Image: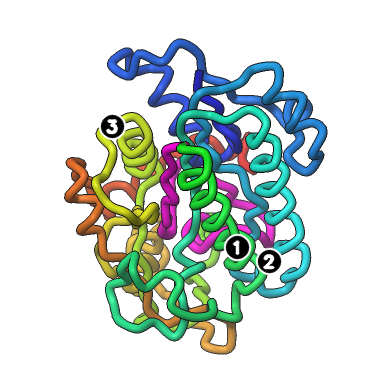
Amino acid sequence: MILITGATGMLGQEVANLLGNNHQFNVDEILTPSRAELNLEDGQSCINYLKKYKPKIVIHLAAKVMGLKGNLELQAESLIKNSLINSNLYSAMLNYLPEKIFFAGTAASYAYPFKSLPLREDLFLKGDVHEGEFGYAWAKRLSYPWLRIFREEFGVKVVYGVLTNLFGPNDRFRGSQTHVIPALINRANVSKSAGGNSLDVWGFPSTTRDFLFSGEAAKVIIHLILGPEINDNSILVNIGSGVETPMSSVASIIAREFALGKVNWLHDKPIGVSRRYLNIDKLNGSGITVNHDFDGQLTSTINWYMNNLGRLR
């Protein structure tokens, strides 16, 4: 029995669908509770749920995600909510120990200033985090000691996945608390619908990120939790494309797909770190290859967006 927290989110839906639709995984039951069934901000709700189901595997994807702008402006809320979500679930698991735990961390938790690029797992804890996502990054980083203790004191097999910037279908495209790619897709559509011919982008064309399609991230997570255990003392595994993609490429593809003739770079807006991408040697060595077709995957995400405008978040 596998419990997926955050199963209604972009990544959670991909993981649940892949597990449910592929019989090779031989999963007897997949738990994808709603907030009404499992409220991770309520410690007693966590205890009651785990007592009832006692899952053997926990894939912990749930988080309060607000994007760069939200994390920058609501540092305390991000720290409090994410710390509470994680500590409630882990505290409950102490009473009903699973066999395996996967946790979805973030590249924002890497020590900054970066010691080198691409970012390697051994650099993860070598300093403080970037101030732009300070509360969110520290709340996510604080899962590290929990997982270490689960492994070393209780013998639970654990993976702390350090995820890069994800994009894909079922993302949150609207509102102020979105990530960069869905925000730009929605902004491009709004501009086009209003008769405009330009796309406004925060920051600089040279800003880079490591972008990974959500379906590929889901395949990696399932591989790491159900495949052969990585022979490595570290519980950290980078999950990314390993490719440094400039924002100029992102903006160019989105502008092309919406037939917008101009990109306006807003240099006065926050961008976080100027460069970031992950070393995925450890992931590649585990026996899985990430398919990175950024243009094609971004285009398919835009097509999904246009076909689902009526039910977007």
Which residues, given as a range, are shown in magenta? Answer: 156-184
The answer to whether one can see residue 150 in this image is: yes
View extreme (bottom): residue: 268
Measured as percent of width and height from the top left, residue 143 is found at 57, 55
Kindly indicate whether the residue at mark 1 contacts the one at mark 2 (C-beta within 8 angstroms): yes
Kindly indicate whether the residue at mark 3 contacts the one at mark 1 (C-beta within 8 angstroms): no
Q: Quadrant of the C terminus?
A: top right
Measured as percent of width and height from the top left, residue 97 is found at 58, 30
Quickly name the residue at label 1: 67
- Label 1 or label 3, whichever lies nearer to me, is 3
Q: Residues within 10 Å of mark 1 (few under 14, many from 20)?
A: some
* Amino acid found under the numbered disc labelled 1: Gly
Residue at 51% across, 68% down: 109
Measured as percent of width and height from the top left, residue 102 is found at 46, 41
Measured as percent of width and height from the top left, residue 107 is found at 45, 64
Nearer-the-camera pick, 138 or 267: 138
Nearer-the-camera pick, 130 or 259: 130
Q: Residues within 10 Å of mark 3 (few under 14, many from 20)?
A: some
Quickly name the residue at label 2: 70
Between discs 3 and 2, the one toward the N terminus: 2
Magenta stretch containing residue 157, yes or no?
Answer: yes
The answer to whether one can see residue 247 in this image is: no
As measured in the structure, the alpha-carbon distance from the residue carrying label 2 to the one carrying label 1 is 5 Å
Q: Which mark is residue 227?
A: 3
How many numbered marks does the figure carry?
3
Magenta stretch containing residue 288, yes or no?
Answer: no
* Amino acid found under the numbered disc labelled 3: Gly
Q: Is residue 61 above or below residue 258?
A: above
Q: Is residue 50 above or below residue 39?
A: above
